[in-house]
Image: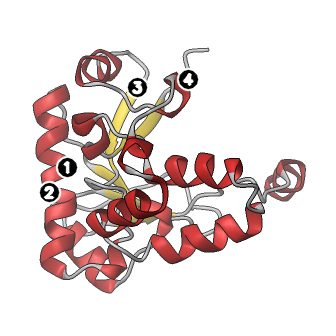
């Protein structure tokens, strides 16, 4: 439909070809018959951990093979696919940290690594240096904003549920926080659309 869109990417899964941890947890807990509300609690608990801790948890609970994709639906882009995708006319690339990290649970140095190393990976793979970032889970803090601004981003997308004043303008020194309405398993999309109109 020729609609431009920003795709916020995290590169660790592309480089390792492991499934995203939430997918691993979800498919294994579904097999075990765990209720989705219990699963959601587990996800909220785990997102406070770093990528290595989450991976250890998954291996302890489901085995080392659980990290392997089981099909196209739960596998990440490979490097060649991401490179080709980034060249599409209506595709724009944004940063989403190396590991989809919940940044407020990291030190400032770790935040810097999560964001700047993902920038390096994205440039290496696509030739693009994003000027925008979406904070994973919408989680951010003063430290996260400070580091993001220091790294030169113009826009940072949150999950604060309110409208933005258009047009969006970022000054050279100031990072612009962009609010967004998200759709999730718990969303009633029709109510959201009524609210926005």
C-beta proximity under 8 Å, tags 1 and 2? yes
C-beta proximity under 8 Å, tags 3 and 4? no
What residue is at 79 percent from the left and 55 percent from the top? 196
Residue on which the image places disc 4: 3
Q: Earlier in the sequence, mark 1 or mark 4?
A: 4
Q: Position of residue 32 (x, y in %)?
A: 69, 54
Q: Earlier in the sequence, mark 4 or mark 2?
A: 4
C-beta proximity under 8 Å, tags 2 and 3? no
Residue on which the image places disc 2: 116
What residue is at 35 percent from the left and 48 percent from the top? 64
Q: Position of residue 69 (x, y in %)?
A: 44, 33
Q: Is residue 161 left or right of residue 64?
A: right
Q: Which secondary structure lies at badge 2?
A: helix
Residue on which the image places disc 3: 91
Residue on which the image places disc 1: 118
C-beta proximity under 8 Å, tags 1 and 3? no
* Label 1, label 3: how far apart the Cα atoms are: 18 Å
Q: Position of residue 129 (x, y in %)?
A: 17, 40
* Label 1, label 2: how far apart the Cα atoms are: 5 Å
């Amino acid at each position: 439909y020729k609609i431009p869109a920003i795709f916020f990417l995290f590169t660790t899964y592309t480089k390792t070809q492991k499934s995203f941890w939430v997918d691993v947890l979800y498919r294994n807990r579904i097999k075990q018959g765990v209720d989705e509300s219990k699963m959601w609690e587990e996800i909220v608990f785990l997102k406070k951990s770093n990528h290595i801790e989450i991976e250890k948890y998954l291996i302890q609970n489901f085995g080392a093979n659980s990290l392997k994709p089981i099909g196209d639906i739960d596998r990440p882009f490979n490097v060649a696919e991401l490179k080709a995708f980034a060249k599409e006319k209506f595709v724009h690339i944004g940063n989403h940290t190396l590991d989809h990290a919940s940044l407020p649970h990291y030190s400032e140095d770790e935040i810097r690594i999560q964001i700047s190393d993902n920038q390096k990976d994205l440039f290496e793979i696509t030739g693009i240096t994003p000027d925008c970032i979406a904070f994973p889970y919408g989680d951010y803090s003063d430290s996260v904003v400070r580091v993001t601004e220091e790294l030169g981003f113009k826009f940072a997308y949150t999950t604060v549920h309110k409208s933005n004043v258009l047009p969006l303008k970022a000054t050279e020194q100031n990072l612009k926080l962009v609010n967004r309405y998200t759709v999730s398993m718990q969303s009633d999309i029709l109510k959201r659309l009524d609210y926005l109109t």
